[in-house]
Image (tube, rainbow, N blue to C red):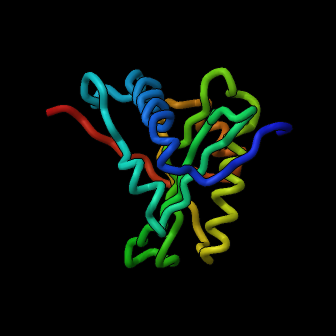
Amino acid sequence: MKGIFTREATLEDLETLLEFEQGVVEAEKPLDPFLGKGELHYYNIPELITADYTQFLVAVSNNEIVACGYIRIDNSKIYQKNPKHGYIGFMFVKPSFRGQKISTILLDSLKNWAKEKELKELRLDVYNNNIEALKVYERFGFTKILVNMRMDI
């Protein structure tokens, strides 16, 4: 994509990233009746930016942050073949920039970081009814492996 580049997020980006976090929450509320009311916080953004086991990127267009995503090195379950994996989260693209393959640019950069860290597997979570996100991730090469279920009691 012409004019879009990624860079590491900094603490100076925090205000924008907090807005993006609320964008994620608002997008997910209709998908998940178990989410609470009001402003919710999913991420410790300063830690994601500064930790050495994460890579937090923003996508920039004309000096404007238009998207973000991170990868975190996680331990796998003891019965899984790869002892560690990269977990991708907080993928968000501003609505006015969607459909321009910016998620793919971010995912490619995050995947490259994972390769540099010698990881062999990437994982992420996505709502099963988030059709647009599922399409993006499947086009990138992710496959569904598990369904998480719950119920009210």
Front-lying residue, 71 or 152: 71
Image quarter where the N terminus lies is top right
Up the image or down, 117 lies above or below 40; here it is below
Front-lying residue, 47 or 119: 47
Q: Position of residue 26 (x, y in %)?
A: 42, 24
Choose top left, top right, bottom left or bottom right for residue 32. top left
Residue sitting at x 61%, y 23%: 95
Q: Position of residue 132 (x, y in %)?
A: 62, 30
Residue sitting at x 33%, y 42%: 149
Taking the view exactly as shown, the residue that stands out farthest to the front is: 12
Q: How many marks?
A: 0
Choose top left, top right, bottom left or bottom right for residue 28. top left
Q: Is residue 7 left or right of residue 84?
A: right
Up the image or down, 51 lies above or below 142; here it is below
Up the image or down, 108 lies above or below 60; here it is below
Front-lying residue, 22 or 13: 13
Q: Is residue 33 left or right of residue 21?
A: left
Residue sitting at x 36%, y 49%: 44
Choose top left, top right, bottom left or bottom right for residue 66. top right
Taking the view exactly as shown, the residue that stands out farthest to the left is: 153
Q: Position of residue 11 (x, y in %)?
A: 47, 49
Image quarter where the C terminus lies is top left
Q: Is residue 60 left or right of residue 84?
A: right
Q: Position of residue 120 (x, y in %)?
A: 61, 72
Residue sitting at x 52%, y 31%: 130
